[in-house]
Image (cartoon, coloured by chain):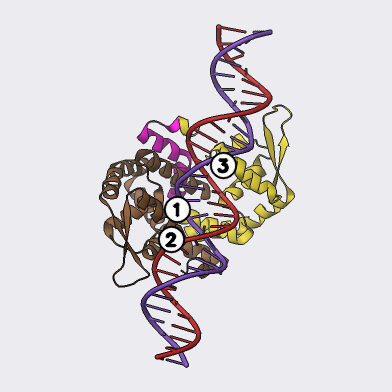
Chain colours: A yellow, B brown, C purple, D red
Amino acid sequence: MQKAHSSLFRAADRFLGEEVGLSTSQHAVLLILMQHDGAPISAIAGELKMGKSSLTGLIDRMEKKGLVSRRQSADDARSFEIHIRDHGRHLVRSTLPGTKRINRSILEPFSAQEQEVIARFLNHVASNADEIVATQTSRKHKENHPQ
Amino acid sequence: MQKAHSSLFRAADRFLGEEVGLSTSQHAVLLILMQHDGAPISAIAGELKMGKSSLTGLIDRMEKKGLVSRRQSADDARSFEIHIRDHGRHLVRSTLPGTKRINRSILEPFSAQEQEVIARFLNHVASNADEIVATQTSRKHKENHPQ
DNA sequence: TATATTTAGTTCACATACGAAATAAATTAT
DNA sequence: ATAATTTATTTCGTATGTGAACTAAATATA
């Protein structure tokens, strides 16, 4: 299972990197911001199931590339709003056809019913992977994604 | 899709790391060596679809932990055989029940027929992800995994 | 209000992966 | 046999992710 996942993950990453110079995470951040522009770092980290410390570096690099900008929150002096910039917006839009093509191409050999099962499976994994693993180890979970 | 994969990938990685101190890649290397002990670095890199340079570091760290050992190939003066050591063998064995439990638990909500579809899908992804992406970008592929 | 706790974000040391370039040995071509 | 090419591995610089420890601000509790 891990192998299947890691190879798709790496292949998708390679595709994005070659195509427009975005890592998977950068791409994911942009997609989130397209829906929730101005989201704070914590929220983005939560959505991506990444540690906050990772987001600091990720947003740094994206800022350096001119994809997003940090803006002080008016309400909370600790917090920053992350805003997508035009460059980021255009870039992420340019990836949509390619990623759609790839998804189609991956699902091509499967029937409509089978694709439904696959979609259900992937959603299940996406929303429960953390909990499933946590249940098995039955500890260290809250300590890992607490922040 | 990427999100689903990255979150499972990371969750599995966390599980292995917490449980016995193995990264997914280290685990995968040990599993390969259980079947093909003495495999050279190139072959392992090929199986994992990783660059050879990555394997140098990976094997370095595994050697430092006493999981595997490098041994000069008798035939080829450039090549090293990677051998699994007892410590590695015991460690990877100890992970098997846990990973089986997790796999079962992930597949639990799906019927036998659905599980068959899922397995077919994952195998498809594992063996074709690279090619699918390569077809789309239609270049840079052989240059990336040539060595 | 004063103190304690939680929360947002960063910094740090480290693990991991990558591609390009280097080295050295094996193979192929001439 | 010599030269050109390919192959196996390492080194280097860089990107990415992590958890622990830190700072500062917000919130809760006393």
Query: Label 3 to label 1, Cα distance in Å?
Result: 19 Å
Query: Residue drawn 31% across and 44% down?
Result: B95
Residue A45 covered by magenta stretch: no
Say what amino acid the circle numbered 2 marks: Lys
Q: Which residue is mark 3?
A: A54
Q: Which residue is mark 1?
A: A6
Question: Badge 2: few (under 14), some or many (20 or more) residues near its Cα, within 10 Å?
Answer: some
Secondary structure beneath disc 2?
loop
Q: Nearer the viewer, residue A144 or B37?
A: B37
Query: Residue drawn 63% across and 59% down?
Result: A20
Q: Chain of mark 1?
A: A
Question: Badge 3: few (under 14), some or many (20 or more) residues near its Cα, within 10 Å?
Answer: few
Check if mark 1's residue and mark 2's residue have beta carbons within 8 Å.
yes
Q: Are marks 1 and 2 on the same chain?
A: no
The image position of residue A145, as x and y in percent, is: 50, 34
Q: Are marks 2 and 3 on the same chain?
A: no
Say what amino acid the circle numbered 1 marks: Ser
Q: Which residues are magenta?
A: A115-142
Left or right: A17, with A121 as reference point = right
Nearer the viewer's eye, disc 2 or disc 3?
Answer: 3
Check if mark 2's residue and mark 3's residue have beta carbons within 8 Å.
no
In the image, residue A51 above or below residue B81 = above
In the image, residue B67 above or below residue C8 = below
**Label ID, residue B49:** 2
Say what amino acid the circle numbered 3 marks: Ser
Query: Label 1 to label 2, Cα distance in Å?
Result: 9 Å
Q: Nearer the viewer, residue A66 or A97?
A: A66
